[in-house]
Amino acid sequence: MDDILLKNGRLLEDEFFSKKDAILIEQLRQLQRMEQTQKALSEVSGITNKAVLKHLVDLDIHPDLLATLALVPLVEVAWADGEIQTEERMAILEGSVKLGMGPGSVDHTLLKEWLKQKPSPKMLDAWIAYVRGLCEVLTPPERDALRDTFLTRARHVAEAAGGFLGLTSKISSEEEAMLKKLASAFAD
């Protein structure tokens, strides 16, 4: 009888620890998936703030969505003065490749279309609404980090065409107005 009790006790113990191990293994897998998603988000967006990346993962923001979001400000700034200069086009395409959106990717194809034909104003409205909603759930430092990432890239595109022989501003008044409009999406 003692052997049966001891054997059953060991079976219960093994079962208990087997379930605990399974739970711990699943938690480890979830942590690894979260870290992989954070890394992918960082690569796509250029965001390095770990708190922002974790929050984006918690909000179920995926790299493909963030990649597309990151393109909108670039395209809007480039089209702000009514046309896209060659230098702006090159800056956007080079930047997109650095973000992992190389030729053949869906984002790259979409971007090339946006560079040929100005997107509908509804796209900018949707981007602003999405960013405002996202900012409602981010902490102020997270919001600021996200804003700085998007606006730094957009400013780089605006500066790409440069001024006339260094005599005029590198950024047109229309581009400057668009940068302000984009920044307003991050306001409190």
Image: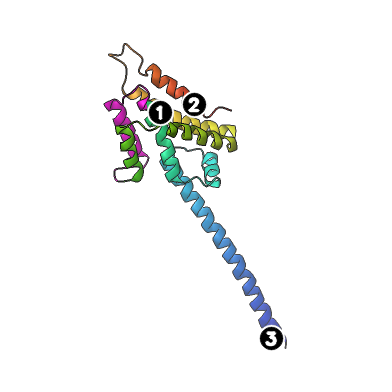
Check the image and name the residue furthest to the top: 167
Residue behind mark 2: 183
Q: Earlier in the sequence, mark 3 or mark 2?
A: 3
Magenta stretch in the rendered image: 78-104
Amino acid type of the residue that numbered disc 1 sits on in the rendered structure? Ala
Quadrant hosting residue 10:
bottom right
Judged by depth in the image, the label closer to the viewer, 1 or 3, is 1
| Kind of residue at disc 3 | Ile
Number of the front mark, 3 or 2? 2
Q: Quadrant of the N terminus?
A: bottom right
Residue at the extreme right of the image, as rendered: 1
Which of pointers 1 and 3 lies earlier in the amino acid sequence? 3
Q: Tag on residue 2?
A: none
Q: Residue furthest bottom?
A: 1
Mark 2 in CB contact with mark 1 (< 8 angstroms): no
> Coloring scheme of the render?
rainbow
How far across and down, in percent of the image, does residue 64 sit? 42, 45
| Residue 121 rendering spot, x and y as whole percentages | 42, 30
Tell me which residue sits at (53%, 53%) in the image.
31
Circle 1: element type: helix
Q: Which mark is residue 4?
A: 3
Q: CA distance from mark 1 to mark 3?
A: 73 Å
* Placement of 78 over or under 34, stated as above or below: above
State yes or no: residue 96 in magenta. Answer: yes
Left or right: 17, with 146 as reference point: right
Vertical placement of residue 158 versus 4, above or below: above
Q: Earlier in the sequence, mark 2 or mark 1?
A: 1
**Residue 183 location, x and y as percent?**
49, 26
Q: Position of residue 167 (x, y in %)?
A: 31, 11
Tag 3, which secondary structure? helix
Kindly identify which residue carries mark 1.
154
Identify residue type, mark 2.
Ala
